[in-house]
Image (spheres, grey):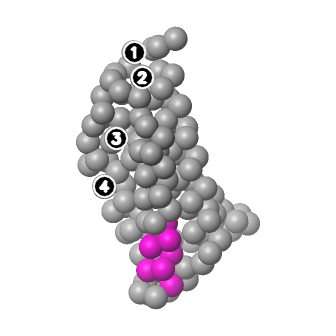
Amino acid sequence: MFTPALLWGLVILLVTGLPGENIPESDLLKIPHIDKVIHFVLFAVMGALLVYGFGKKHRGKRLHSRTLFFCIALGFFYGILTEYLQYCCFSGRHGNVADAIANGFGTIFGVILSAQLVQKNDWLSGKKTT
């Protein structure tokens, strides 16, 4: 159920823990604030995968707002944790508040979007509801 979210969390940890000098040069990375977009997308996927896991666990039932809040809180916590690890533990990386905010907004977006998909389209079973 939660394997995709756990694996994605590991991907996030590996990407955010990559030493700064090991990040390949790219013109894409020279776009202003592209790092915030990357953080947003990484955590939007995390939020969606958390909702997907809970949806699988409670198949056929509407997800409770407390569950969605828990997904958001978990994403926020993990986003802050990765920034803290960048700040204190990862070589050549610098955690910052703006990245943590992008992580949080990405999580909210992913949770809300995937919750809407689950409700409107029964995303987990492929059945369309009206």
Label 1 element class: loop
Residue on which the image places disc 4: 7
The amino acid marked with disc number 1 is: Lys
Q: Is residue 16 above or below residue 60?
A: below
Residue at image mark 1:
127
**Amino acid bearing label 3:** Phe
Can residue 38 be seen here? The reply is: no
- The residue positioned 70% from the left and 65% from the top of the image is 33
Say which residue label 2 marks: 122
| Towards the viewer: 24 or 121 | 121
Amino acid identity at mark 4: Leu
Q: Is residue 1 left or right of residue 103?
A: left
Residue 11: x and y in percent read 37, 61
Q: Earlier in the sequence, mark 3 or mark 2?
A: 3
Q: Which residues are magenta?
A: 79-87
* Side of 61 relative to 20 (left or right): left
Q: CA distance from mark 1 to mark 3?
A: 18 Å
Q: Quadrant of the N terminus?
A: top left
Q: CA distance from mark 4 to mark 1?
A: 27 Å
Q: In front of the other: label 1 or label 3?
A: 3
Q: Which mark is in front, 4 or 2?
A: 2
**Residue beneath label 3, please?**
54
How crowded pointer 3 is (Cα within 10 Å; few <14, some 14-19, many 20+) is rated as some
Tell me if label 1 and label 2 are in contact, CB under 8 Å.
yes
Residue 24, image x, y percentages: 51, 71
Q: Looking at numbered disc 2 in the image, what kind of residue is underneath it?
A: Asp
